[in-house]
Amino acid sequence: MIQFQCDYNEGAIPVSCNVFLIAIWSRRWGMVKMPIAMKLVN
Amino acid sequence: MEQTVGYGEDAYCDEARKLIQKACQREDVDIHFLVGGTQANTTVIAHILRPHQGVIAASSGHINVHETGAIESTGHKVLAIPTDDGKLTASQIEEAMLEHINEDGPEHMVQPGMVYLSFPTEIGTIYSAEELKAIRAMCDKYDLPLFIDGARLGYGLCSPECDLTLPQLSQLADVFYIGGTKVGALFGEAVIITSDALKKDFRYSIKQHGGMLAKGRLLGIQFATLFTDDLYFQISRHAIDEAMRIRAALQAKGIGFLIDSPTNQQFPIFTNEQAAILSQNFLLSPWKRIDDTHVAMRICTSWATKHENVDCLIEAIDKL
């Protein structure tokens, strides 16, 4: 199913955001923030 | 591990503020980062209004139809004005004010205390610079703060029909916000306060409305990224380009629209059969039942919409 439902739905969350969250929880955010920030808007 | 101060006072939020101030061409604005649109709307409106006041909005405005009474839950009525195209006009604002002022005993009524509009509107339309200037003048005439909800701001500013810029918007609104949640961020809205009178104690309002994110850097990093190298506008333009391709395909097929939207939301009117066929492969939103045999659907593009997926949709529209 190709989504055109809305501009905030889960399909519009980049995969890297999962890494983003994991990074926060693993407290390694400071080490990975730039690559993730770049991927966030990839 | 990197440790920073919390609550939006870290270096990343400071960097994002400077970048947004530069984009707005105003260094005198206050900028606060909140998590989502409903939270931004309730916090700003409750911060501005006095207890006996309400907020003027279009009847189709987001705060009136899609926020579960969040504004009313703060004790402030939404004073809804019917519109055909989702846009308030300066004359409608004046009519609402005169109706209140000319009441016999206006203190028995909710006093209009501010104006809310969104850019784009809930149905994808946009205000022209001239229309917004007229609304600004009317707000000045009646001492009404003007609040512009910019949850989809990028998609409005990048519309081919938009004659406004971010710096111009910064001059017209007393408070507005730049949406991140719908424009590429994981979450977050940047609330920009241009009016000195409204800046005082806004952080108290944020905290009281549950909007103060302890790990505030997560908001700052995202907005600093979005406002570096014109990224916010690049990804907004992408959504608009794809939406315009869809609009052209629908027009070529002779399909009508609920409203002529120049932004990332399109509202074609399909027959029930056409809607059912498209819904087999595409996730669209039913928006409004037109009659027994026709329905208006919302087709929404975003920064993440793939060009090839739009190709598929256009092919399907062509086969209808």
Image (tube, coloured by chain):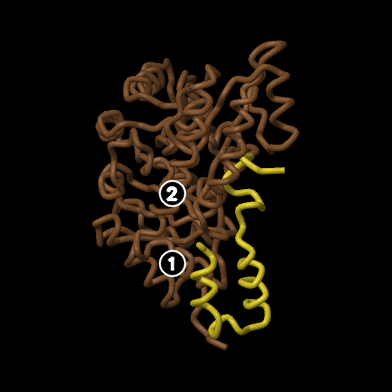
Chain colours: A yellow, B brown
| Pick the front one: B164 or B212 | B164
At 45% from the left and 76% from the top, the residue drawn is B10
The label on residue B272 is none
- Reading the image, the residue beneath label 1 is B225
Q: Earlier in the sequence, mark 2 or mark 1?
A: 1
Residue B45 in the image: state x and y as whole percent: 47, 44
Q: Is residue A16 left or right of residue B180?
A: right
| Amino acid type for the residue under numbered disc 2 | Ser
| Amino acid type for the residue under numbered disc 1 | Thr
At 54% from the left and 33% from the top, the residue drawn is B77
Q: Secondary structure at mark 2?
A: helix
| Pick the front one: B64 or B12 | B12
At 36% from the left and 18% from the top, the residue drawn is B95
Residue, far bottom: B1
Residue B312 in the image: state x and y as whole percent: 61, 39
Which quarter shows the C terminus of chain B? top right
Residue B200 in the image: state x and y as whole percent: 37, 58
Is the Cβ of the residue at disc 2 closer than 8 Å to that at disc 1? Answer: no
| Pick the front one: B230 or B78 | B230
- Reading the image, the residue beneath label 2 is B236
With respect to residue A35, does B136 lie above or below? Answer: above
At 60% from the left and 44% from the top, the residue drawn is B309
With respect to residue B65, does B41 lie above or below? Answer: below
Q: CA distance from mark 2 to mark 1?
A: 14 Å
Residue B162 seen anywhere in this rendered image of the structure: yes
The residue marked by circle 2 belongs to what chain?
B
Residue B53 seen anywhere in this rendered image of the structure: no
